[in-house]
Structure formats: structure tokens, C-alpha cells
């Protein structure tokens, strides 16, 4: 007796539409038209004999039955995709893809990968830099580094680094400026402002009982890497965030002005969908990255290259 399963195209269309909540977005993901998505979902509703989506206030909403079905289908499709990946020729070549912020890739991940390549030359790594959060369930990306108080609940996750911030500058700038012994001394120095984290100086100064409005001179840049580069060029004092500043501190191109960094309450997490975690190369890379991240500064702790 044959299985009582509706057409696979209808299952995929409904799962994508339930996830996106938008016909056009679901169609774009699957490479078909919005009307084709609508037709496939109606076909599935006829097969199961109940409404899975309703239109309310010109928006599509998933019914209770539809929500339960979508959740179960997502797990089934993840397992199906994982099974396909296990036998995929592309995966046998040892390829792992990871999504992260551009500056995080430039300042932290790329330098770390030199060590990983020495230990695992059989695994190729693809970095996908994107400032926006990527929906891993709808992409072919294996891993992502997410920033926040907690990770996405939809994927397997691991805590990498608890973020800290501390003022940093070059040794040459500090020698020219003279000793800085207390937070208020910073107010007479040029401070480097990073537009991608506009509140970082306010957060640090408020924690250290300093009135930020008294600062005489700012240099403003729009990326984390530009802020740290400016500080390395003796242009002033920047906020050094872990893990962005790790390599500069290990090399000595930047130094911490004060001994104790401040925790922000934010964390960097490594996340992966179930389908990818079943692939050995993904687990190998993840295990290595987690271990490296637990070091006080991985560029000091990892064995140097020959």
C-alpha cells in the first residue's frame, strides 16, 4: 500500500510560506511565482481537509493546525536535507560555510583561520559576510555567528565569547600623551567614535562616572575595523571590543589603558541548523572554533605557525 503523502512541492510551498508569512518571499526562496505558492498550499489544504492559513487584515496567518504542521514539517525537512548532505559530493570535498559580520571576519576570523588551515588542510572554509542576520533554515549556510543576549531558538547554539569593552590606543600615543590614570583623563584626548556602535562611549563613561559631554574632540568612522586602525595610527583612543581587538592586543599594536574591561552583557554565539550539525566537517570546525574562543586571547594561546 502506497504512502498517504501529498505532493512534495505542496509540502515545500506550505513550509516556506508558513516561515516567511509572505507569498512573494516564499516564491523567491523556491524559485516559483507567488501564485504557484498559493496554488500548492490550496492543494495541500484539500489533501489534509482543513485550513492551514487564513487571511486577516490583508495578511496571511497560520492556523493552529497549520502551525503544528509547519513545525513538524520543518523538522522533517531538516532531517531530509541532512541525509542528502551526508551523501553529497560537495560535502565530501570538506567545505564549511559560515556567516558573520564583515569587521568580525576581517579582524578576528580570517587571522584565526590561518591556524585552522594548518591543523585541517582538508577542510575548505567559505566566509559569508553580511551585516544582517541570515535565516539559516532557508539557506545553504552551515554556521553563523550571532550577537545578542541569547541566540536564535531555532538552531543548535554554543556560547563563544562574552563581549567586553575597554579604551585602547597605541603605545606611541600613550607615550606622547603622558600617563592616563583615571577615566576623566580621557576627556582631554581625541576619542574615536564608531558609528556602527554609537552608544559604546556613553556606556563606558557612565559606568565610570564621567560626563561624556565634556569631550573636546572626536574622530568619527563607520566601521569597527576603521576605528581600530585609526587608533593604531596614533590618532586617538578607541573602544576595544572583544573579539575585534584581540589580534591588535596580542601583536602590541594597541594596548589597554585600564586593567579591567567592562562586560556589556552581550555574547557572540555559534549557531547551526540541525541539518548541518550532522556533517562531520561542520562539527570539526565548530569544535575547533569553540575551543579557540574559550582562550583569554586566542592569538596568544594558539600554537604559532612554523
Image: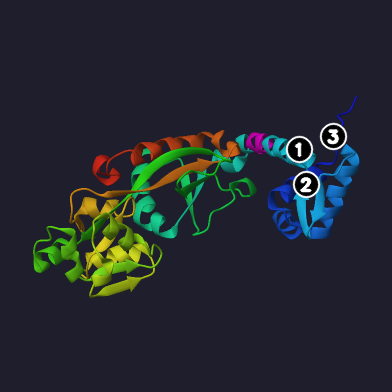
Q: Residues within 10 Å of mark 3 (few under 14, many from 20)?
A: few
In the image, is residue 52 above or below residue 241?
A: above
Q: Decide whether the magenta segment is chiefly helix, strand or loop.
A: helix
In-front residue for pair 279/205: 205
**Of callouts 2 and 3, the N-terminal one:** 3
Q: Position of residue 130 (x, y in %)?
A: 50, 58
Q: Position of residue 121 (x, y in %)?
A: 41, 41
Identify the residue under disc 2: 14
Q: Are marks 2 and 1 in contact (CB under 8 Å)?
A: yes
Query: In screen coordinates, is 256 left or right of 219?
Result: left
Residue at 19% from the left image edge and 65% from the top image edge: 186
- Per the image, label 2 sits on a secondary structure element best described as helix
- Residue stretch in magenta: 78-84
* Whole-number angstrom distance, CA of label 2 to CA of label 3: 14 Å
Identify the residue under disc 3: 5
- Per the image, label 1 sits on a secondary structure element best described as helix
Q: Place residue 81 in its image quadrant.
A: top right
Asked whether residue 216 is in view, the answer is yes
* Camera-nearest label, 3 or 1: 1
For the C terminus, give its image quadrant: top left
Q: Position of residue 214 (x, y in %)?
A: 23, 71
In-front residue for pair 101/204: 204
Query: In screen coordinates, is 52 left or right of 240?
Result: right
Identify the residue under disc 1: 69
* Camera-nearest label, 2 or 3: 2
Q: Place residue 78 in its image quadrant.
A: top right
**Of callouts 3 and 1, the N-terminal one:** 3
Residue at 31% from the left image edge and 62% from the top image edge: 201
* Camera-nearest label, 2 or 1: 1
* Whole-number angstrom distance, CA of label 2 to CA of label 1: 9 Å
Query: In screen coordinates, is 4 left or right of 291?
Result: right
**Of callouts 2 and 1, the N-terminal one:** 2
Amino acid at each position: 500500500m502506497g504512502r498517504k503523502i501529498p505532493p512534495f512541492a505542496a509540502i515545500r510551498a506550505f513550509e516556506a510560506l508558513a516561515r516567511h508569512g509572505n507569498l512573494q518571499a516564499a516564491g523567491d526562496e523556491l524559485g516559483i511565482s507567488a501564485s504557484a505558492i498559493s496554488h500548492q498550499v490550496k492543494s495541500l489544504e484539500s489533501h489534509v481537509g482543513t485550513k492551514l492559513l487564513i487571511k486577516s487584515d490583508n495578511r496571511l496567518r497560520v492556523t493552529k493546525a497549520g502551525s503544528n504542521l509547519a513545525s513538524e514539517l520543518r523538522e522533517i525537512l531538516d532531517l531530509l536535507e541532512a541525509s542528502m548532505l551526508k551523501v553529497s559530493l560537495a560535502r565530501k570535498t570538506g567545505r564549511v560555510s559560515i556567516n558573520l559580520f564583515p569587521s568580525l571576519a576581517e579582524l578576528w576570523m580570517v587571522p584565526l583561520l590561518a591556524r585552522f588551515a594548518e591543523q585541517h588542510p582538508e577542510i575548505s572554509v567559505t566566509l559569508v559576510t553580511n551585516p544582517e542576520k541570515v535565516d539559516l533554515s532557508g539557506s545553504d549556510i552551515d554556521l553563523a555567528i550571532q550577537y545578542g543576549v541569547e541566540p536564535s531558538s531555532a538552531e543548535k547554539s554554543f556560547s563563544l565569547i562574552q563581549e567586553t569593552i575597554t579604551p585602547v590606543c597605541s603605545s606611541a600615543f600613550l607615550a606622547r600623551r603622558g600617563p592616563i590614570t583615571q577615566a576623566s583623563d580621557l576627556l582631554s584626548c581625541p576619542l574615536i567614535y564608531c558609528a556602527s556602535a554609537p552608544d559604546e562611549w556613553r556606556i563606558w563613561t557612565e559606568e565610570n562616572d564621567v560626563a561624556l559631554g565634556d569631550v573636546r574632540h572626536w574622530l568619527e568612522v563607520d566601521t569597527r575595523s576603521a576605528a581600530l586602525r585609526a587608533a593604531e595610527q596614533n590618532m586617538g583612543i578607541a573602544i576595544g571590543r572583544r573579539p575585534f581587538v584581540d589580534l591588535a592586543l596580542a601583536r602590541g599594536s594597541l594596548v589597554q589603558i585600564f586593567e579591567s574591561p567592562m562586560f556589556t552583557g552581550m555574547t557572540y554565539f555559534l549557531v547551526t541548523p540541525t541539518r548541518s550539525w550532522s556533517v562531520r566537517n561542520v562539527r570539526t570546525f565548530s569544535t575547533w572554533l569553540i575551543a579557540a574562543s574559550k582562550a583569554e586571547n586566542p592569538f596568544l594561546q594558539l600554537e604559532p605557525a612554523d
